[in-house]
């Protein structure tokens, strides 16, 4: 069985993330969307909330699951039996950073490969940061995130008001 992980913060999950998830799920027997618990980063949603949102929007994809982890991605991949790390690329600037991480991961664990997928053009501009910026001003974020996610994001900002 070919197992891959797609690690990230997913704060919140966007259509760009879903694009990568669906395409990766078609390539591997099992895909684990792995939410990184990064205490150094101030997140809008808790790790558990992000995992639940991913489960909600990927529930119709049978070979996709969601989980969380802390520590090194390669250690997590090894622990869950994954041999591939999926990374999405929006632009050349993403590639430079991601290549460095992939090469470092390969030195740390030569059994784990990284597969880069370019995001579909219609999502190449999209990031969770943009979603949060628009939401903070009460803008319509329905073009950026699944309909199930919209009220969750907006609720976070209405609590801050």
Image (cartoon, rainbow, N blue to C red):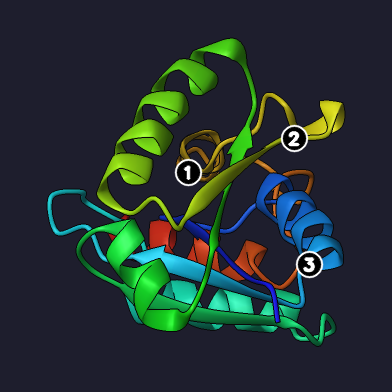
Residue at screen point 29% across, 56% down: 43
Figure check: 48 above or below 111 = below
* CB-based contact (under 8 Å), mark 2 and mark 3: no
Give the quadrant of the C terminus. bottom left
Which x, y percent locates residue 56?
67, 82
Q: Is residue 54 visible?
A: yes
Where does label 3 land, which residue?
25
Which x, y percent locates residue 87?
57, 43
Where does label 2 land, which residue?
119
Say which of 25 and 28 sits in front: 28
Toward which corner of the image does residue 96 lie, by quadrant?
top left
Toward which corner of the image does residue 105 lie, by quadrant?
top left
Helix, strand or loop at label 3? It is: helix
Precedes in sequence: disc 1 or disc 3: 3
Which x, y percent locates residue 104?
30, 36
Which x, y percent locates residue 126?
65, 33
Precedes in sequence: disc 2 or disc 3: 3
Give the quadrant of the N terminus. bottom right
Q: Residue furthest left?
A: 40
User: Residue 21 vs residue 61: left or right?
Assistant: left
Mark pair 1, 3: CA separation: 27 Å
Helix, strand or loop at label 1? It is: helix
User: Residue 63 vs residue 88: left or right?
Assistant: right
Question: Mark 3 packing: few (<14 Cα in 10 Å), some, or many (20+)?
Answer: many
Q: Is residue 11 visible?
A: no
Precedes in sequence: disc 2 or disc 1: 2
**Which of the two discs, 2 and 3, sits closer to the camera?**
3
Residue at screen point 38% across, 43% down: 106
Q: State how many labels appear.
A: 3
Where does label 1 land, which residue?
132
């Amino acid at each position: 069985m070919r197992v891959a992980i797609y690690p990230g913060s997913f704060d919140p999950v966007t259509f760009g993330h879903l694009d990568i998830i669906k395409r990766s799920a078609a390539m591997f027997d099992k895909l684990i969307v792995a939410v990184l618990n990064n205490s150094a980063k101030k997140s809008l949603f808790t790790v558990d909330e992000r995992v639940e949102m991913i489960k909600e929007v990927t529930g119709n994809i049978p070979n996709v699951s969601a989980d969380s982890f802390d520590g090194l991605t390669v250690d997590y991949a090894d622990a869950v039996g994954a041999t591939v790390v999926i990374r999405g690329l929006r632009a050349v600037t993403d590639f430079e950073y991601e290549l460095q991480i992939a090469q470092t991961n390969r030195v740390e664990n030569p059994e784990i490969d990284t597969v880069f997928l370019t995001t579909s053009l219609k999502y190449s501009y999209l990031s969770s940061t943009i979603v949060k910026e628009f939401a903070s001003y009460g803008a319509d974020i329905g073009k950026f995130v699944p309909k199930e996610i919209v009220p969750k994001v907006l609720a976070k900002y209405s609590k801050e008001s």
